[in-house]
Image: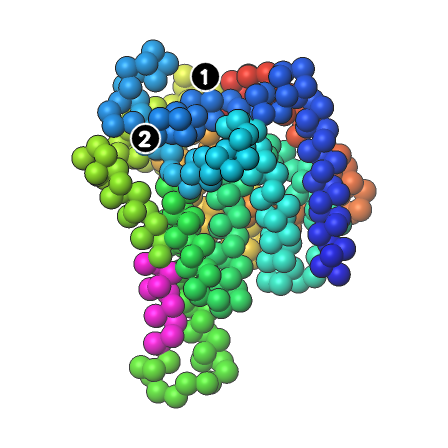
């Protein structure tokens, strides 16, 4: 059965990727066309020059630095470039082309084990035509981040704490929001383990009953904290500021305010209304996640959303919608519809995905 599922996922993945490749041909090929914004600037400079010691004087990046971009994905890209001789854009495409089908399978296994049987054909079609998978295919860290997030959740579900802790360590080396995810997953794991222990009655005594859940939870939190701390120590050695990854974002107008401030700010300025719409859609899907009782996934998204929502609306569509937990909630909502409605959504998702792929390759700022 596993071979059949893998074969189907790979078939759909290759078909959709092939169409994306064809759409990108007029823009210089998928590697060059998809390497926009952070890929063309921050990741390229990290790979070619390393992290900046001081803010740059370059015209486009005046007063800014690449400290906000965590090292896991750039390091893997650099390794692939060294081993294969590929250019940076093509190395990023290859990495995410390999990771994406693994992510689809892991999400399928996780959601079916936790919430009941799932038709893998519908699941793979939904996932691989879901519009935010644009950011899972191009040279961004979203695919690796999503894989490590679901990997941590999957191995916690199977109570394989050592592998889950390794995933948490790498997760916190991939994006700053990784530590937030670990801080959400840890208490859910702890209370679930306590409930399981009490229910099956394997351990007698009040104190002994708490030892395994507490120890495992602390290991998970320590692993996540170690991943973040490793990057912070490096930044302190490089710049003298261990929180440089956060402080440098002030140059992008990322400043913490009460929730809702930035939405009202964008509405009053009548600019980036697409960010406002994305934030509203994010809130709706998170609400539906709680309605559908996907508590772990919805809470993880909520904490990440509030962190991003309170600092800026910039890229909030990518931060939340490209998270695999977001897809799981959307899937749980759509799968309850009629067969005709599901088919309509699959085709609608596919058309939107192809459209935003062209927009992205063209360089439009609407998806920034």
Q: Where residue 39 appears, x then y in whole percent?
A: 47, 26
Residue 99, quarter of picture: top right
Residue at the far bottom in the pictured view: 204
Give SS at disc 2: loop
Q: How is the image coloured?
A: rainbow
- Residue at left offset 50%, top offset 33%: 81
The residue at which mark 2 appears reads as 51
Give yes or no for residue 212 being in the magenta stretch: yes
* Secondary element at tag 1: loop
Q: Residues within 10 Å of mark 1 (few under 14, many from 20)?
A: few
Tell me the CA gap for discs 1 and 2: 35 Å
Residue 269 rendering spot, x and y as whole percentages: 41, 16
Instruction: Report the magenta residues as a range.
Output: 210-222
Q: Is residue 343 left or right of residue 38?
A: right
- How many marks overall? 2
| Residue at screen point 48% across, 35% down | 82
Given this view, does label 1 or label 2 mark the residue nearer the observer? 2
Q: Quadrant of the N terminus?
A: bottom right
Q: Residue at x 74, y 57 (%)?
A: 3
Prevailing SS of the magenta stretch? helix
In the image, is residue 109 part of the stretch drawn in magenta? no
Residue under numbered circle 1: 270
Q: Nearer the viewer, residue 70 or 266?
A: 70
- Which residue reaches farthest right? 340
- Horizontal and vertical percent position of residue 232: 27, 42
Q: Position of residue 293 (x, y in %)?
A: 56, 57
Q: Nearer the viewer, residue 339 or 133?
A: 133
Q: Which of the pair 34/318 is nearer the observer?
A: 34
Observer able to see residue 176: yes
Up the image or down, 179 lies above or below 36; here it is below
């Amino acid at each position: 059965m596993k071979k059949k599922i893998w074969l189907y996922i790979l078939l759909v993945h290759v078909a959709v990727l092939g169409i994306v490749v064809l759409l990108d041909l007029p823009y210089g090929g998928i590697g060059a066309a998809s390497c926009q914004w952070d890929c063309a600037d921050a990741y390229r400079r990290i790979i070619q020059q390393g992290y900046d010691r001081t803010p740059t004087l370059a015209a486009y990046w005046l007063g800014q630095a690449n400290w906000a971009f965590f090292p896991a994905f750039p390091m893997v890209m650099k390794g692939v470039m060294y081993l294969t001789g590929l250019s940076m854009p093509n190395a990023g495409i290859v990495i995410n082309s390999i990771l994406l089908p693994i992510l689809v399978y892991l999400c399928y296994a996780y959601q079916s084990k936790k919430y009941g049987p799932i038709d893998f054909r519908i699941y793979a079609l939904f996932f691989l035509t879901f519009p935010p998978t644009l950011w899972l295919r191009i040279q961004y860290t979203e695919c690796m981040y999503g894989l490590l997030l679901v990997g941590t959740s999957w191995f916690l579900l199977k109570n394989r704490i050592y592998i889950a802790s390794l995933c948490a360590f790498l997760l916190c080396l991939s994006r700053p929001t990784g530590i937030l995810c670990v801080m959400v997953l840890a208490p859910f794991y702890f209370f679930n383990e306590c409930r399981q222990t009490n229910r099956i009655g394997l351990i007698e005594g009040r104190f002994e009953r708490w030892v395994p859940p507490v120890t495992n939870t602390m290991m998970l939190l320590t692993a996540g904290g170690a991943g973040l701390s490793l990057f912070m120590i490096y930044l302190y050695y490089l710049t003298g500021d261990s929180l440089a990854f956060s402080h440098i974002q002030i140059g992008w107008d990322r400043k913490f305010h009460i929730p809702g401030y930035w939405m009202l700010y964008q509405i009053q300025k009548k600019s980036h209304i697409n960010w406002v719409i994305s934030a509203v859609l994010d809130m709706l899907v998170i609400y539906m996640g709680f309605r559908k009782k996907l508590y772990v996934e919805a809470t993880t998204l909520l904490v990440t959303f509030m962190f991003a929502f309170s600092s800026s609306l910039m890229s909030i569509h990518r931060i939340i919608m490209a998270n695999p937990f977001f897809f799981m909630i959307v899937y749980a909502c759509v799968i309850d519809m009629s067969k005709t409605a599901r088919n309509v959504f699959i085709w609608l998702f596919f058309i939107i995905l192809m459209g935003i792929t062209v927009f992205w390759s063209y360089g439009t700022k609407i998806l920034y």
